[in-house]
Amino acid sequence: MIVGAGPSGATAAACLARRGWRVAVVGPRPGAVARGETLAAEARSVLAGAGLWELVERLGRPCHSSWSVWGTPWPHRRDPLAGPWGPPWHVDVGRLTDALLDLAVRFGARLYPGRARVGRGGAPAAVSFELDGGQEEVTAGFLLDASGRAALGARAFGASRLTVDHQVAVTTWMRVDSPAVSTLVEATETGWWSTLADAGRLYLNYFTDPDLLPRPLALDAELRGAPHTAARVRAAGRGARPRLAVTSGSVLNRVAGCGWAAIGDAAATFDPLAGMGLHHALNSAVTAADAVHGALLGTEDGLDDYARSERDLFHEHLRARRRRYAAEGRWADRPFWRRRTRRVVPERPARRPVSLCPC
Ligand SMILES: Cc1cc2nc3c(=O)[nH]c(=O)nc-3n(C[C@H](O)[C@H](O)[C@H](O)COP(=O)(O)OP(=O)(O)OC[C@H]3O[C@@H](n4cnc5c(N)ncnc54)[C@H](O)[C@@H]3O)c2cc1C
């Protein structure tokens, strides 16, 4: 049983159903949401191994133009061919996930578009969900939690989420005439901007901390600190209504246990500066699906290794994150930058979460 039909749930469903397991996925289909994201080049290796890279090539576009305004007021070009895997790719996450779910169904997986509730207690897990107005309950031999930050399966098994910051993103998109594929990252005193242009759309994200958000929310005023991003926005049409999203870094204190494992954002979330959230969602799904296959056959149990590699990845990410933020020295004494250049230890968030309301 897989809870969550996002990128990680869809990938795990395709991998396990292809191996002949009876797979049920509970969760709303993402549909054609406007959500352009960059898929790190490293994803190619693991997706090609799982026979899924062809989908990315069909639905995405390689990005050969990446710029960053970081540490200096002028843009630097980032060489997309610097690594062995070629350039990163732009994908519409909704379309990619839909295609992965279609593939899973072709291999025999069943989709239940309701919202799941996971019963507490030991394995195997009881998952209940609403279907056509009625309540269904399935007792699963193994539960993969792909429910994103909610991590409702892992929490039912007693795991809890540890966080390293409270970062949020204000996100919107607008139409642009140019079909060119390119990205720009630009640092400001209170956070950083990312823009991604692809197929006539400009996706705009502003990352900051909730206590630094202007109230009421006025992106135009904030853009004055980011002249290169502002120039791209001026050349675009009217934007969609901005949305607020939580983008804090976090990891579960336990990523897998007897009869369950968390994948994708449910297991760990990374600072978007690393651009590895989607790669991690797909990669962790493929790796965990391998481990679940072995555990269900009783031949080898790779779940401990999987859990360890998730923890190691997150701690390596924290070290890299600190180095990346320290490379921007222009506002080293300002709260946003000070918070990210000190050593942090993942901890349980305060009971009362920081208010996200921008008004
Ligand atoms: C603004 C923003 C920009 C980003 N940009 C990038 C980028 O450019 N590159 C990149 O690599 N990453 C990026 N990310 C991160 C990336 O989107 C995520 O890491 C990735 O989508 C995680 O996939 P997932 O399947 O693990 O989780 P999700 O995409 O969160 O999917 C979880 C699914 O579970 C479902 N669910 C939740 N509760 C239940 C329930 N009770 N019952 C059933 N289903 C449930 C949800 O509806 C959802 O469909 C960005 C994130 C944000 C917020």
Image (cartoon, rainbow, N blue to C red):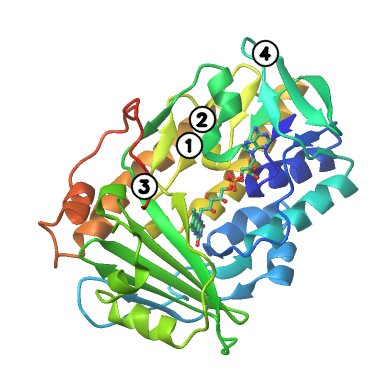
- Residue 291 higher or lower than 273, as above or below: above
Marks 2/4: CA–CA distance: 17 Å
Mark 4–mark 1 CB contact (< 8 Å):
no
Q: Please, what secondary structure does the residue beneath circle 4 have?
A: loop
Mark 3–mark 2 CB contact (< 8 Å):
no
Residue kind at label 2, given as amino acid type: Ala
Residue tagged 3: 317
Q: Confirm or reject: label 2 Cβ below 8 Å from ligand 1.
A: no
Residue tagged 2: 307
Q: Position of residue 290 (x, y in %)?
A: 68, 36
Residue tagged 1: 310
Q: Confirm or reject: label 3 Cβ below 8 Å from ligand 1.
A: no
Mark 1–mark 2 CB contact (< 8 Å):
yes
Compare marks 4 and 3 and give the one earlier in the sequence.
4
Q: In this view, does 296 lie to the left or right of 81?
A: right
Compare marks 3 and 1 and give the one earlier in the sequence.
1
Residue tagged 4: 123
